Amino acid sequence: MATVVVTDGEVTAGGVNISTHVSRAVWEYSSEVQDETAFGDTTRISKGGLKTWSITIEGNNDYVGATGPNAVFFSAVGSTMVITTKQSSGASAVTNPLYSGTGLLTEFSPAQMVQGELQPFRAVLQNAGTLTQDLA
């Protein structure tokens, strides 16, 4: 089993590389469950339905830079943008898959003020298109 420690991850949002601000990016990918049970069945029969995905991106905010999370996400809430991630900034490959999707930015937490701590951000995007995985 090949395990990976992510130290050089890459995250782009709306075409802007925000990697130096990100400490966590989590994709959730699932399928709706449809009930195919019919008369005479004694056990529920489930069938896969439409796929759904979301991504939560967290890290340290930057209010000054044009490529910081605040500049990228604040005015985009309620809009769609393309999100991409790789576990390494190198070329996509079987060992470095590129995940990409157009998502609706549903949440952005621009400020969480705690004395003596870095100012974090959190952005959540929901599927507005297909999630793709590039292993080439």
Image: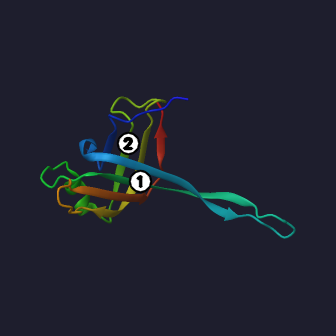
Residue occupying the point 17% across, 60% down: 115
Q: Which amino acid type is shown beneath numbered disc 2? A: Thr
Residue occupying the point 46% across, 29% down: 95
* Percent coordinates x, y for residue 81 in the rendering: 33, 54
Check whether the beta carbons of the residues at disc 2 and disc 1 lie within 8 A of each other.
yes
Quadrant that contains the N terminus: top right
Vertical order, 45 against 11 (above or below): below
* Percent coordinates x, y for residue 126 in the rendering: 42, 59
Which residue was labeled with disc 1? 55
Quadrant hosting residue 36: bottom right
Mark 1, secondary structure of its residue? strand
Residue occupying the point 19% across, 48% down: 67
Which residue was labeled with disc 2? 85
Is residue 100 toward the left or the right of residue 116 in the image? Answer: right
Residue occupying the point 35% across, 47% down: 24
Question: Mark 1: few, some, or many residues within 10 Å (few <14, many ≥20)?
Answer: some
Is residue 28 toward the left or the right of residue 124 in the image? Answer: right
Question: Mark 2: few, some, or many residues within 10 Å (few <14, many ≥20)?
Answer: many
Please tell me which of labels 2 and 1 falls first in the chain.
1
* Percent coordinates x, y for residue 32 in the rendering: 60, 61
The coloring applied to the image is rainbow
